[in-house]
Image: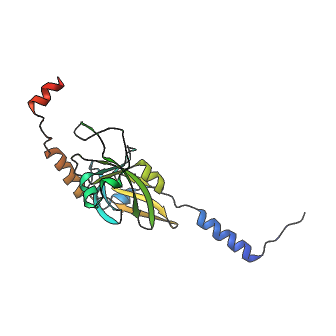
């Protein structure tokens, strides 16, 4: 039986390649809850760099596929209607109303060194959030999120990186939703709908 011997430098290069191909294991433990207020049922609200700006009050919604940008953020980023592409599918707002989107826009979302292009659906309706990122963003980033642990974890350069949630901001957003009074329809408009 003959055995081929690899030069030492080939063995070292192969082991270096193997180390870089191994992705870190993503998971949560009780240690991840240390800086959180427990027990809670807060939404996961984070800060993300969107279109080159640090944007507060971004909700991570792992139960949705829609990536939403609200008009306040759209205007705050100095975007114009000409920047939008058509998006013709209606959505339902937090208030339960059907909302017709203004359009869609693709913007870079940066987390550490990672940049993911996200197609945001722009809507003009009330929300205490500036934007919502959803499963497609998490999947592209190969991230996992936990509302319980108030974190998003993702692999980057062979390490596990974290984005921390802001429970205080999540609670302020919840209070804002509860206190928000939807626009009252005029009685003439309401009668027409009957």
Q: Nearer the viewer, residue 22 or 121?
A: 121
* Residue at 72% from the left image edge and 72% from the top image edge: 11
Q: Position of residue 24 (x, y in %)?
A: 52, 61
Please say if 189 is above or below 55. Answer: above
Number of on-image labels: 0
Which residue sits at x=40%, y=44%?
65
Q: How far across and how far down the image is residue 12, in percent? A: 69, 74
The residue lying at 9 percent from left, 30 percent from top is: 187
Percent coordinates x, y for residue 79 in the rendering: 30, 58
139 to the left or right of 124:
right
Judge left or right: residue 140 versus residue 71.
Answer: right
Which residue: 26% across, 40% down?
A: 93
User: Which quadrant of the view contains residue 108?
Assistant: bottom left
Quarter of image, res 114: bottom left
Q: Is residue 175 left or right of residue 148?
A: left
Residue 149 seen by the camera: no
| Residue 40 coordinates in the image, percent (x, y) | 26, 50
Image quadrant in which the C terminus is located? top left
On the rendered image, what quadrant is the N terminus found in? bottom right
In the image, residue 139 above or below residue 185: below
| Nearer to me, 114 or 3 | 114
Quadrant of the rendered image containing residue 149? bottom left
**On screen, residue 136 above or below 23:** above
Judge whether residue 181 can be spotted in this image: yes
Residue at the outermost right position = 1
């Amino acid at each position: 039986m003959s055995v081929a011997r690899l030069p030492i430098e080939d063995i070292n290069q192969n082991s270096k390649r193997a180390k870089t191909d191994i992705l870190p294991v993503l998971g949560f433990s009780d240690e991840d809850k240390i800086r959180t207020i427990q027990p809670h049922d807060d939404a996961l609200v984070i800060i993300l760099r969107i279109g080159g700006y640090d944007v507060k009050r971004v909700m991570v919604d792992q139960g949705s596929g829609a990536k939403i940008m609200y008009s306040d953020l759209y205007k705050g980023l100095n975007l114009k209607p000409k920047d939008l592409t058509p998006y013709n599918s209606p959505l339902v707002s937090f208030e339960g109303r059907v909302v017709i989107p203004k359009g869609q826009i693709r913007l870079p979302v940066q987390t550490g060194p990672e940049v993911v292009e996200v197609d945001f659906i722009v809507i003009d309706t009330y929300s205490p959030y500036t934007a919502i990122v959803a499963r497609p963003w998490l999947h592209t980033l190969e991230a996992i999120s936990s509302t319980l642990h108030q974190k998003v974890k993702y692999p980057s350069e062979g390490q596990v990186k974290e984005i921390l949630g802001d429970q205080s901001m999540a609670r302020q957003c919840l209070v804002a939703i509860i206190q928000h009074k939807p626009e009252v329809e005029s009685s003439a408009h309401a009668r027409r709908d009957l």
